[in-house]
Structure formats: C-alpha cells, structure tokens
Amino acid sequence: MTYASWNGVTSDSTGQYLAAVSPYNGIYTSSSGGSSWTKTTAPAAQWSAIASDSTGMYLVAVQGSPYGDDDEEGIIYTSTSGGVTWIPTTAPYGNWVAVISDSTGKHLAAVQSRNDYDYKGYIYISATGGTIWTKASAPGSIWSSLASDGTGSRLVAGQKYGSNYNPGSIFTSIIPYSSHPTSVPSSQPTGPTSQPSSRPSRGPSSQPTSQPSQPTSQPSSFPTSPTGQPSNRPSTAPTNQPSSQPTSPTSQPSSNPSSQPTSTPTLQPSLQSIMWSQTSLPSGLWRGLSSDSTGQYLVAVKDNSRGNPGYIYTSSSGGMTWTQTSAPDGRWFSVASDSTGMYIVAVHYGWPTSSIYASTSGGSSWTLTSASGRFNKVVSDSTGMNLAVSEDYGTIFTSSTG
C-alpha cells in the first residue's frame, strides 16, 4: 500500500471490498480485504471521505478538508463499478467532510463544514444514487460527522461548531422513504444466518451478474451479548462470521451498470421540509458517529480539544437518550460498529501515535487494543470482525479478528 496521507476508508458488508481516499494522491480500492490495492481513475483532488454500499460496487467520495479546518473545497463523485470509473455529481461546491451510503447505494447523504457563499456548511441528501442532491433543513453550521441506518432513512449528524462558533451538537432525522417504517424498532434484529452466495444487485437491470462468491463459513466463538444492555438485544452475535478474510477476486468487475436506478422513491414530505431534532447530548466537537443497521443503536465520539472533555456516548433509542460510557477522556476521532451495534471500535487520536479501543458489549466496557499508529478513521464490516483503519500519514491497516 502506498505510504501517504489517508483521510478515510470504507468497506462492504463482508470486509472483502475496501476503498480509501488520499488527498491529491487519489482513490484506491482492494478486492482482497486489504492484501493488495489498485489506484483508480479518480482525479487527483483533496479527497476527504468515502462510503460504500453493502457490496462495495457503489461508492461515493467527497472532496474537502477532512477536519473542516482548511479552505479546501470540491464536489462529490460516485462510482457504480467498484471504483473502476468515477462520475462527478451535481452536488454544490463546498468543503465536504463526511458522507454515508445506505446498503444499496441509492440513499446517500453528505455534510459540509462550510461553503463559499455564506461560510456555513449544510447537509445534502440524495435518493437517486447521487444524480440529484437536495439541501436538508438542518441548520447551517460547521458539520463534522454523519451516520445512518442500513436504509439511509435514519440519519444522525454531528457538528464541530454550532452558531457563533459555539461547541456543536448532535442532530437526528427520519426520512420517510415510502418503504421504511417511521418508528424505532422495538427489538434488535437477529442478523443474517448466512452470507449471500454472490454479490447482490442493487436494482439496475444492468448490474453485473457474475460477481465473486462470498464466504459461507463463520466462526463459532463470536462473543456473546453485553451485560447491562437492553433485554431485547440479540443474545449472541451472528454465529456465521468468517474465520478468515474471504478469497479475493483477481480483477474488478468487467462491466459497469449502464445507469443509476430510473425511479426515485416516494418522499413524504419533501426533503427540504423534513425536521431535524437536536439531541440532549452535551455540546462539543463531535468527530465521529456510527449506527447499527436499524438506526436504534448509535455511538457518538467527542474530541476533548479546546478545553471540552471528550467521551464516547451510546444510545439505544435512536438518539432520544444517551449514556456516557466508561471510555477515557481523550481526542476521539472516529468510531465504527457492526450491524447490531454490539461490536464497536473507536480511534483515540494522539501524538506521536494513536490507539484503538474496542467494545464487545455495545459500549458498556472498553479494551485498549495493541494497535498503534497515526490512526484517524476506522471502518467495520457488518460482523465487527473485519476492520480497516487509515493513518493520517502512513498506510491502511486491516484486522480479521475484530
């Protein structure tokens, strides 16, 4: 892997298909769980963040300063070919700092830290895989982080600074796509019993039909559910996680879908009028957010810079209430979780090295891992077993043991 400055990394649901962005160095992809990487045709630009659908085929990458501190601005690109080709979207020019995708690559969202015309940042949403973007009604501010459930309907966004440069807050919103319920689920899903035998199609009729097979074997000793978590959490994590990184295909897909989906989901009401609610979390510099697949179990990490304490908070109510965890005060920069919200990893930024903390109890307890480096962003597959972490100057590290 090229030794460079890396601003972000993303993964498909299995940890096999990865993508990473490096400012002015390009976008790289891996179809081998990080064993080897290929530089894509994406243009040289100030790439700041990247997101993937559940298959690794549909990618979205944004340009800007990853921390919103500099006047680096750009646009948003998408790929429907696993990174082989890239298309600029109609999203406005701005300092884009975070982006998310649902499991299909159709429902996207991205946040700015600022723009040229009023020096505020906004949240933009796409229900068309990136072909059309709409500014959300959330207040203009210096946004810094973003997460969603698996459908892209339940969004949670964090601010670096709010109005008048006061410490920021966390906001949530529910986009009532016609196929998605508008209430928080009463119980946590049990998860899949097996991985799909082939990479799934997102919806376009021209999706490649010969994707490489996914693994079918899982380890039998995945940790059990945490103590102290709600009783309706699953008693165990899925027992079908891979014991090793899946075998990679030898090449990227040979063909691209001919177009984005032709139909747009029904939105009621319009995106511009959907409400955003400020949560009860204390103000601060919110660097990272993560969500389980349902949007019920959330994690938020706060940087302790500028005299504000930095802790990790969890919510089991879709953001209505929050609990401060036992993780130590520090400069928390990034967080990721599996599809159940039980297995969480977080980056504690430091100089000259950062560290990674892990929780197998939904945040009730934390363990300092042996990982050491200049880490800035972390991502997890749906199982919490396959992880990838980027360095702000270095390389991409992976782990297949959670």
Image (spheres, rainbow, N blue to C red):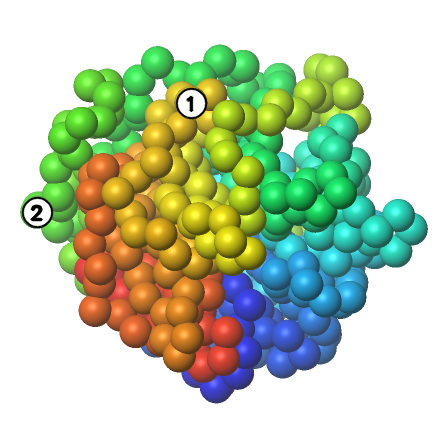
Closer to us: 375 or 384: 375
Decide: few, some or many residues near mark 1? Use Cα within 10 Å; few <14, some 14-19, many ≥20: few
Q: Residue at x 30, y 51 (%)?
A: 328
Specify whether 375 is left or right of 136: left
Task: Please identify the residue farthest to the front as the structure is shown.
Answer: 307
Question: Percent from the top left, x then y, of residue 130?
Answer: 71, 46
Q: How many marks?
A: 2
Q: Residue at x 88, y 48 (%)?
A: 118
Question: Percent from the top left, x then y, of residue 211?
Answer: 44, 56
Rendered image: mark on residue 321 = 1
Quarter of the image with the N terminus is bottom left
Rendered image: mark on residue 313 = none
Q: Residue at x 63, y 80 (%)?
A: 25
Closer to us: 51 or 13: 51
114, above or below 374, in the image = above
Task: Please identify the residue farthest to the right as the structure is shown.
Answer: 117
Question: Percent from the top left, x then y, of residue 363?
Answer: 27, 40
Residue 395 can be seen in this image: yes
* Residue type beneath disc 1: Thr
Task: Please identify the residue farthest to the left as the structure is shown.
Answer: 221
Rendered image: mark on residue 221 = 2
Residue 17 can be seen in this image: no
Question: Percent from the top left, x then y, of residue 381?
Answer: 35, 51
* Residue type beneath disc 2: Ser
Secondary structure beneath label 2: loop
Closer to us: 228 or 22: 228
Q: Earlier in the sequence, mark 1 or mark 2?
A: 2
Closer to us: 343 or 132: 343
Residue 293 falls in which quadrant of the image? Answer: top left
